[in-house]
Image (cartoon, grey):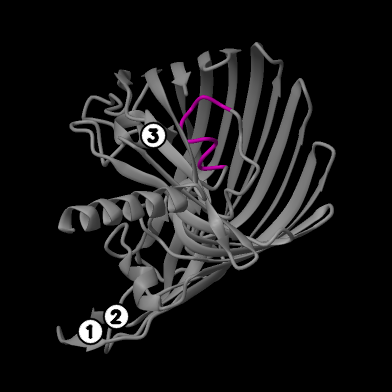
């Protein structure tokens, strides 16, 4: 009898397992990607040069030689990745799905560590959908350049994958998006450098609201983002004592985007008026406008940066493309305190211009490409009355990237 009970339970377990699995479907995917690159000088970058931003300023030695004027290059495979898309059983009237995707970027190239790129679940009711988890920041959105450089247009294009709660409503040609966004791998700059503490102590996530119009290959839209950070919760006063402080900087950023695609063409563009978008790989940050001498508590003013990019790609098998990006430092909203620090990325950068051309060969599951990029950055000194950069000089970098990819 015991034998038959065990057999019956085993059959029941297997039956229930198949009953559960039949409501799921899985799609595994990934890529093996190799990048070889050359730069004519040192640059602001991450992952030892794979994520390229813009050339560093000159640093002269006693003989007048530029210490940053040394060529560099390497070969990496860290952006190979694996992922799975899961479609699950309905939850009420909602279709359920999930995604998990990882690569081997880690924190550098001295060793490879697995990193989560996307990890989210999605509930879809047809005209509306709710996403919970980590995916592209809403400012990255559905419009981004088709280029080989892994920065994907940053710092002109906002670049970040962030934990978020995102709701979308779609009706015929229109789509409305609202999102609450936190920070994880891409962090804001502040008094102690990049840190999650600024938004964690704020107790307020980023807030994004956007609207899009879609019709026959055309997508156009606008968005607005609010970010509120607490740079510090304690400070040292003039008497050397430590005080609890309540500091906050709240900023608004705006973006507009458009793209058109058909069988042969991709045409895309985006413009951003950003305030303190360092968590999205943007230029700028914030400065100090006043300090309470007794407690050391500071008040802040954002650095505003305008950035725009345009990208055109043509073809199917052989695809030539061009990319142009322009960013301009518009200064601060208020006068900066004399001798105070600036917190951010490229705070002494007046403007940045990048132009690139590429050619890729594309067949099913394979891509081979070569890209040349020229970037010119104008550095100078910060004018304290308005935060603008004056007395500028240009620094240029020539970058060549070759890519081979196998996609499955």
Query: Which residue is more in the foreground, 117 or 343?
Result: 117
Q: Earlier in the sequence, mark 3 or mark 1?
A: 3
Residue wearing tag 2? 233
Query: Which residue is more in the foreground, 107 or 346?
Result: 107
Residue 317 at x, y percent in the picture: 65, 11
Which SS class for mark 3? strand
Image-quadrant location for residue 73: top left
Which SS class for mark 1? loop
Image-quadrant location for residue 320: top right
Determine which of the numbered discs, if any, sits on residue 237 in the image: 1
Find the distance from the CA under tag 2 to the CA under tag 3.
40 Å
| Residue density around tag 3, few if under 14, some if 14–19, many if 20 or more, within 10 Å | some
Q: Is residue 95 positioned above or below 80 on the image? A: below
Of all residues, the one furthest to the front in this rendering is 1
**Is residue 237 part of the magenta span, yes or no?**
no
Q: Is residue 388 positioned above or below 401 on the image? A: below
CB-based contact (under 8 Å), mark 2 and mark 3: no
Q: Please give the name of the residue rendered at 55% of the width and 69% of the height, measured from the top-left corner.
A: 251
Residue 263 at x, y percent in the picture: 77, 22
Q: Is residue 347 visible?
A: no
Which SS class for mark 2? loop
Residue wearing tag 3? 82
Residue 308 at x, y percent in the picture: 65, 42
Q: Please give the name of the residue rendered at 34% of the width and 76% of the height, measured from the top-left corner.
A: 201
314 sits left or right of 72 in the view? right
């Amino acid at each position: 009898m015991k034998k038959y009970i065990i057999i019956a339970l085993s059959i029941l377990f297997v039956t229930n397992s198949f009953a559960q699995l039949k409501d799921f479907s899985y799609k595994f995917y990934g890529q093996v990607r190799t990048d070889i690159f050359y730069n004519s000088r040192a640059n602001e970058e991450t992952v030892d040069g794979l994520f390229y931003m813009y050339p560093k300023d000159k640093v002269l030695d006693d003989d007048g030689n530029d210490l940053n004027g040394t060529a560099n290059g390497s070969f990496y495979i860290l952006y190979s990745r694996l992922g799975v898309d899961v479609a699950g059983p309905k939850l009420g009237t909602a279709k359920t799905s999930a995604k998990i995707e990882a690569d081997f970027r880690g924190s550098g190239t001295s060793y490879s560590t697995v990193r989560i790129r996307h990890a989210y679940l999605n509930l879809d009711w047809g005209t509306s959908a709710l996403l919970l988890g980590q995916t592209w920041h809403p400012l990255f959105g559905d419009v981004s350049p088709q280029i080989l450089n892994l920065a994907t247009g940053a710092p002109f294009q906002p670049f970040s994958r962030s934990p978020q709660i995102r709701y979308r409503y779609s009706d015929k040609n229109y789509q409305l998006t609202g999102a609450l966004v936190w920070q994880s791998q891409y962090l804001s700059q502040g008094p102690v450098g990049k840190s999650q503490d600024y938004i964690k102590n704020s107790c307020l996530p980023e807030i994004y609201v956007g609207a899009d119009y879609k019709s026959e290959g055309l997508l156009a839209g606008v968005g607005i983002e609010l970010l509120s950070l607490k740079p510090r919760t304690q400070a040292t006063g003039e008497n050397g004592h430590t005080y609890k402080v309540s500091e906050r900087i709240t900023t608004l950023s705006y973006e507009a985007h458009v793209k058109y695609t058909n069988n042969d063409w991709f045409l895309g563009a985006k413009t951003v008026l950003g305030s303190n978008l360092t968590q999205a790989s943007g230029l700028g940050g914030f400065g100090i406008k006043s300090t309470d001498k007794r407690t050391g508590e500071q008040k802040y003013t954002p650095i505003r940066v305008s950035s725009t990019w345009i990208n055109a790609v043509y073809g199917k098998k052989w695809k030539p493309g061009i990319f142009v990006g322009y960013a301009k430092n518009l200064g601060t909203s208020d006068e900066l305190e004399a001798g105070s620090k600036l917190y951010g990325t490229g705070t002494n950068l007046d403007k940045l211009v990048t132009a690139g051309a590429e050619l890729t060969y594309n067949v099913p599951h394979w891509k081979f490409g070569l890209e040349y990029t020229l970037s010119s950055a104008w550095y100078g000194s910060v004018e304290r009355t308005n935060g603008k950069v004056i007395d500028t000089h240009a620094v240029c970098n020539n970058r060549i990237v070759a890519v081979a990819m196998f996609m499955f």
